[in-house]
Image (cartoon, rainbow, N blue to C red):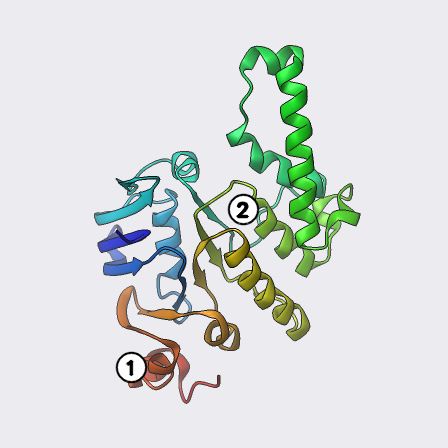
């Protein structure tokens, strides 16, 4: 059973069809790219996968635990509990909270103490909060943000805000991670660092990753398979070498030869 199976997924907004009969299959542990020109429908697909939008038609099946679950149309918080996390094209941190608190908030869906303990700060509350604090610090160390844990998120440089958003997503303990243009706005050095970070977290956390990205160098380096959208329709899929030479991709998206 694939980790994620998308069948004939369609989303219409009034008379506009943003995504039409899209099929995507991702196996456990894969790192898959989703590319296409601006307005192709990539982020719309992410919004459908995470419950921001309800599909007009089609099915989204997630392998969660031992059973496949239809997640199309479920609430975002329920989909998160099933093991799906995402980042956003436009960074959406809690900018007036500390770096540490951004990560701690994401972890609270998995707390094991009850309401009474949280109100009266009983032993189970104190033990669990200490554990969460240690875990949050560990996530920050992965992205070299530990020394800035008390700073407000909005005061971080842009590249570090991107890393913090990924750390926050990881803190929900997902099995499927959706990255929406994680390299957007980064310089080449930051992109190179991010590329290695994505490789490392995939292996370290046993993740399946679906990645939207316009930086073709990053996509070609780390993605094992690639899907290509154009005007809401899937026009190609395959390994990077196949996508690089596909005439439909070059015409619709690249406007010429693809640089690896």
**Crowding near the residue tagged with mark 1, few <14, some 14–19, many ≥20 C-alpha atoms within 10 Å:** some
Tell which circle, 2 or 1, labels the residue nearer the N-terminal end.
Answer: 2
Query: What is the secondary structure assignment of the residue under circle 1?
Result: helix
CA distance separating discs 2 and 1: 34 Å
Percent x, y of residue 118: 61, 16
- x, y (%) of residue 182? 55, 61
> Does the image show residue 96?
no
Task: Report helix, strand or loop for mark 2.
Answer: helix
- Residue at label 1? 248
User: On the image, which quarter does residue 242 sit in?
Assistant: bottom left
Please name whichever residue, 188 or 221, is drawn nearer the observer in this view of the structure.
Answer: 221
- Residue 169 tag number: 2
Asked whether the viewer can see residue 100, the reply is yes
- In the depicted view, which residue is nearer to us: 52 or 201? 201
> Compared with residue 187, is residue 10 higher up or lower down, i.e. above or below?
above
Coordinates of residue 203 in the picture (x, y in percent): 51, 58
Q: Residue at x 63, y 19 (%)?
A: 125
């Amino acid at each position: 059973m694939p980790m994620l199976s998308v069948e004939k997924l369609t989303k219409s907004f009034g008379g506009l069809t943003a995504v039409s009969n899209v099929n995507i299959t991702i196996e456990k542990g894969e790192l898959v790219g989703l590319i296409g020109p601006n307005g192709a429908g990539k982020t719309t697909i992410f919004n459908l996968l995470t419950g921001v939008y309800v599909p007009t038609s089609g099915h989204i099946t997630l392998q969660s635990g031992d059973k496949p679950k239809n997640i199309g149309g479920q609430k975002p918080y329920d989909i998160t509990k099933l093991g799906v996390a995402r980042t956003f094209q436009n960074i959406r941190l809690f900018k007036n909270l500390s770096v540490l608190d951004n990560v701690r908030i994401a972890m609270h869906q998995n707390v094991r103490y009850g309401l009474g303990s949280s109100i009266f700060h009983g032993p189970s509350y104190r033990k669990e909060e200490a554990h969460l604090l240690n875990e949050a610090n560990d996530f920050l160390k992965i992205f070299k943000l530990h020394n800035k844990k008390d700073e407000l998120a909005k005061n971080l440089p842009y590249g570090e805000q991107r890393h913090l958003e990924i750390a926050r997503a990881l803190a929900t303990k997902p099995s499927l991670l959706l990255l929406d243009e994680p390299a957007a706005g980064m310089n080449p050095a930051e992109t190179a660092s991010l590329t290695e970070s994505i490789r490392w977290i995939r292996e370290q956390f046993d993740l399946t990753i679906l990645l939207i990205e316009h930086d073709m160098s990053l996509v070609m380096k780390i993605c094992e398979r690639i899907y290509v959208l154009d005007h809401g329709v899937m026009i190609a899929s395959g390994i990077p070498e196949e996508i690089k030479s596909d005439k439909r991709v070059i015409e619709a998206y690249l406007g010429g030869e693809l640089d690896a």
